[in-house]
Image (tube, rainbow, N blue to C red):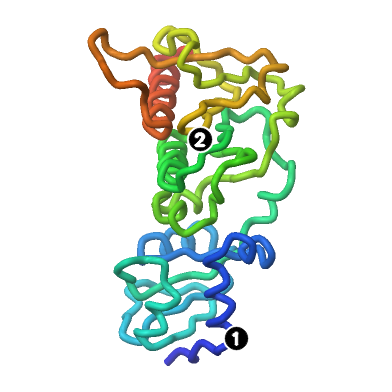
Amino acid sequence: MFPILSRNQIKFIRTLKQKKYRYKFKNYMVEGEKLVTDILRHKAEMVAYLVVDKSYEIPFAIPNVNVYTVDTETFRMLSNMVQPQGILAVCKIPHQYFSNGWNTELFSLYLDGIQDPGNLGTILRSAEWFGIKQVFIGAGTVDPFGPKTVQAGMGSHSYLQLFQAHPADFIHWPHPLILADMHGKNAYQHNWTIGGVLVLGNEGQGVSSSFDPQNPLRLTIPAATHSRSESLNVSMACTVFLTLRHKFSLEGNH
């Protein structure tokens, strides 16, 4: 039998629905059986404690993490999901997110003003699928630890290293900066490098001018001859770019 969640804990968890409190306390929520299982398996040290609906039966072994219980009505109040699954984790935002402890040799993503949490979560999910380990969250990008982004990421937060960053951090970057740009060179013909940073921009405006001083390489994904669509969704474009890079590497080109 687990102890009952206190009133102060209930108030605290409810504050995590707002970005300012997530960053004040450096905590965020992970919900649902799959996502909670992932973070317990891969980053259990980041889990402060679990909360379960009193009717929920935990189907997996719990590591050395405190578990609290609440009634169904309270759990629904705490949850950000339309149909709560009966389990959530209060997690710590990793310290590295606020540091500059990144690896300049890794091929990485920089997200410049991505505003839709669904797009951001999908980008993180694609990044993890294609073996990207390091993602930079630029100014104007939606909070990666917000509930909609975490849900759309489908557990990718458990595997990726996320960092806050600014274009100025890349002035002396040792590998190419590659900007997704509608007027760039043909991405199908690009020879990808082991290192580098792929910069993806705002859904409506694209990449900001902040990277112009670095004179980056600009790539585009050409549409089919008779396509009438204006552009690709940024998360779809990300997946295409990463697919091209992955294919290039599988063919033994680096």
**As drawn, 167 above or below 42:** above
Please determine whether, in this image, residue 230 is positioned above or below residue 112.
above
Q: Quadrant of residue 23?
A: bottom right
Counting from the top left corner in percent of width and height, residue 248 is at: 42, 16
Q: Residue at x 71, y 20 (%)?
A: 174
Residue sitting nearer the eye, 25 or 89: 25
Front in this rendered view, residue 79 or 251: 79
Inspect the image, locate mark 1, and give the three-letter code of the amino acid beneath it.
Asn
Of callouts 1 and 2, the N-terminal one = 1
- Image quadrant in which you'd find residue 9: bottom right
Image point 50% across, 48% down: which residue? Answer: 159
- Disc 2 crowd rating (10 Å Cα; few below 14, some 14-19, many 20+) is some
Task: Specify the quadrant of the image occupied by residue 222.
Answer: top left
- State whether residue 164 is above or below residue 80: above
| Residue 254 visible within the image | no
Q: Residue at x 48, y 60 (%)?
A: 39
Would residue 168 appear left or right of 53 to someone viewing this image?
right
Which residue was labeled with disc 1? 8
- Residue where numbered disc 2 is placed: 132
Q: Secondary structure at mark 1?
A: helix
